[in-house]
Amino acid sequence: MRQYKGVAVGFTTPVLGRLTTTPQVDDTNSTITLTGDDLFIGAAGNGLKQSASFKFNNLNEMPHEGDVVQLDPSGLCTVLIESASKNNIFLLTECCNSRCITCPQPPKQKDTHDHFGLALSLIDLLPQGIESITLTGGEPTLFWENLVPLIKNIRTKHPDLIVNLLTNGRVLKNYGKVALLAEAGGNKLHVAIPLFADYDDLHDEMTGVKGSFWETVEGLYNLERCNLRIELRFVITRLNFERLPAWAEHVYRFFPFVNHVALMGLEMMGWANENSHNIWAEPREYMTKLIEAARIFNRRGLLFSIYNYPLCILPETLRRFAYSSISEWKRKFFTICENCGQKDCCGGIFNSSASYLKDELKPIT
Amino acid sequence: MNLEFDLKAISINALKNAAYSFLGDYEFQFKTSGTNVQVTITPLKNGLIQPDIASIYRNAALDHQIRIETEKDYRVIREMIVAQAFEPCDNVDELVQKIKP
Amino acid sequence: MSEFPYRFLPFRFERFDRSILLANDVGEFCFLDSTVFDRFIHRQLSPSEEMFKNLKSKRFLFDDHLPEIIEQLAIAYRTKKQFLFDFTTLHMLVVTQRCNQNCLYCHAVSKSQDSDTCETDMSLETAHRCVEMALMSPAPSIKIEFQGGEPLIAFGVIRSIVDTANTLNENIGKNIEFVICTNLTLISAEIIDFLLQNKNISISTSLDGPESIHDACRCDRAGVGSYRVFKDKFRLLQSSIGKERISALMTVTPYNLERLKEVVNEYVESGFNSIFLRPLNKFGAAQVNWGKLNYNVDDFLVHFKEILDYIITLNLKGHYFPEVYTTILLTRILTPYSTGFVDLQSPAGTGISGVIYDYNGDVYVSDEARMLQRTTGDRHFCIGNVHKNTWGDIFCSSQLKEIVDKSCIESLAGCAWCVFQPYCGGDPVNNYAEQGEIYGHRYANEMCHRHKGVFNLLFEYLRKNDPEIMDVFWSWIMNKPINQIAISPGSYAAV
């Protein structure tokens, strides 16, 4: 999440609210009004004194109108909801039941913050008109008693909002749980699940958990039984890129009901970065396999997209499938990109992948 | 034409199944004595016999033996798949335990 | 030699030169080199080998998680046999035996137009009962197909059936499609009007090729070829109801077997979207005229390959033009889905997927069964009559059950181990007519011989995996223009 440093005066607990420069008469006490360049007066009822203020260190780098932020007494301003973004990400937990070798945000043993509680507050603060949000972790389904009510809550308060749930699907091997999920989220709940290979040994090797492949597969079948929308994801690494075409055929043969497939580039952070010697492969090494997988899906009418690649790295054939998937605050462009004719359509690259890919980038004329 | 087979290496069913596809053109007779079986192949019409019928038949029999051997492994699995397809049950795990070799 | 601890999942195989084709019960297939195959069956294939991973992924071997694998394969198997769950979807009605034509290969033993209609035409009462019977099928979607003779001669009966079906269906809520199988020569303004008002009716007609080919077999009762009338009526019909509602099939005879390219060109020029290359059925007049109409299976296969290559080339030039039979088989091989093609399925479609109601209300398990009765008088496959029997009497009869039992190719000699089994099917009526009993003998069965040849041909294309040919095949399977299938749009010309 985007973060800004500043100096907080006059408040003792973190304050959550939606930013605006126009003074509001706000019954919900949810608006934080920014007046002048750097001063703010909290809305009454936030537990703040009228003279509370937050001064941003860099006036050229500030959150935007409509963003939902958390201001800490320590001087940290964290943007939790970006008003300009089509899709906002809610972290629900840092715990996980898998140990994926590609994990950009390695799991913790215990959550140190009440992420679910924060999520509930954010749901109240979510501006109307946002298209979608993403619930992620760690593994959100580990906290079942919190997850289902959260999804119900979202559906009640924002009935048109698409909720993307990122999960490894293993807990979903339990049909009863998936039925509850379907009841809570209905057709607005889109579930995205990674499947690293077309056979169990390799998938289990990459998730670090023996048996995870078949648990996830059972989860997929349960999602289908409950009519929930599924996106199946393949993270492309040195360990599995050879299997791309076989994976594509396997998905069509055994999971033809999948609504969308995402073929994804690595985010080289956390464990992915630590394991780079094992998992990083140059795009040119696997581009033929990627094209073959794309061909397989396209022939069969299975919708797919390619995530996390700048347009110049992809061959022209595949560019129309590229989706700008990288959150704005994680995204990077280089000076060389200024001359590129496709910059406006391009999703850029991950900050964390910059050093890996920078020599491959070139402007498209 | 007479061919000899050792029943320790190839089963009588493999020999009979292999014979099936040739029945349009040949008649087959099987005579067992101990662990040997003699297969007599007689052409049905015109008395014409294919020159390489012996090797073709032998190879077909060997392939049928492969089918019989591999089927020992998967026969029960096939029955379970079909059963589960048309009359699904919740305790496939238990049933699989019962068929472990 | 020590073995690797993997076990086999159900599969079948066949050798082709140096290559071995494997196929499993859910239609997944794989080509193996013969040395790799030997190692596979002797459990010498190491888990680190690419082929091991392929065979595991495609479900030919496993080492663990058998319960989950069984569940997955059961789901896939059930999907493949989905056609069983709806029960009888195709209901053919013989509205008249009379025909204005006298085609050389007519399997329906048609009668002349001035015959006594009591002996030839379906009465309105019979028609009503047939519609009631058809609507009793549990299938949510049914197709009512008008057969004959020439159905348009009894247009009044057709009109009555459509009206009755639509009316009765208001309380039932099925999705009904109607098809009129007609030689097209009797199309009139009144009939076109009727088709414009009832958009759920489509036309299936016969075009054997350009004039000289078509008229070699398809003449009126005076011996005059029907091509010119056909073309006139076709143009009239097409301009009124459009291309999408008209399809054509052709019957392969010695008159066109070596001129199939001309036939295909005729179809393309006429504006048809597809062709169905249908081999001859040895019933009725075809049997009588067999001397003139006979061709052997091997000849058929040679020419089938030639014409398929030609059709593929046309598609690559931008004409979307599938061969329907090939498309059905490819859909079975390359997709996980079921295909509703009642003539080739296991158990056979006889009665349980398709059924035919004769002009007098007799119910037969298939069109061939009706033709058998016409040709030889044998009523072996008549399962009842709409005037005398209930739905239960007919569709739950032990007679029907026996026919279906004996047509499960999974347990028939020859089919049980055939590598093409997951894609093929049985025809108990054909077996009975050709070989004297329902089981049939694969070793001398023309239908088997022909299908093996066609499958061999298709799998050879699949083994070569030429990207352009595969794009054509997928455009047929998906029913989309090739440029939508291709990974690079615009890589093929568009016509």
Image: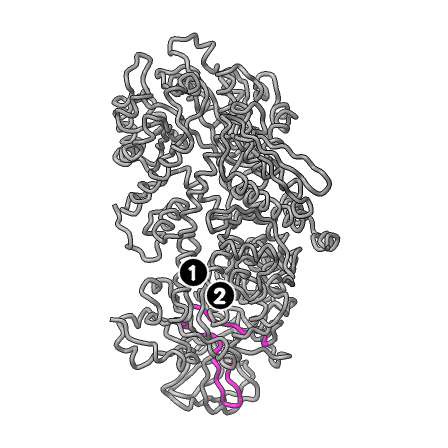
Q: Which mark is residue A234?
A: 2
Residue C189 location in percent, x, y? Answer: 30, 22
Q: Can you say whether C219 is above or below A219 in the image?
A: above
User: Which chain letter goes with mark 1?
Assistant: A
Which residue is the site of mark 1?
A: A293
Q: Can you say whether B86 is above or below A275 in the image?
A: above
State which tag comes first along the sequence, 1 or 2.
2
Q: Which mark is residue A131?
A: none
Which is closer to the viewer, label 1 or label 2?
1
Amino acid residing under circle 1: Ala
Q: Can you say whether C187 is above or below B75 in the image?
A: above
- C280 in magenta: no
Magenta-tinted stretch: A69-94
Which one is nearer the viewer's eye here, C234 or A149? C234
Residue C36 location in percent, x, y? Answer: 53, 57
Of the 4 image quadrants, the one containing the C terminus of chain C is top left
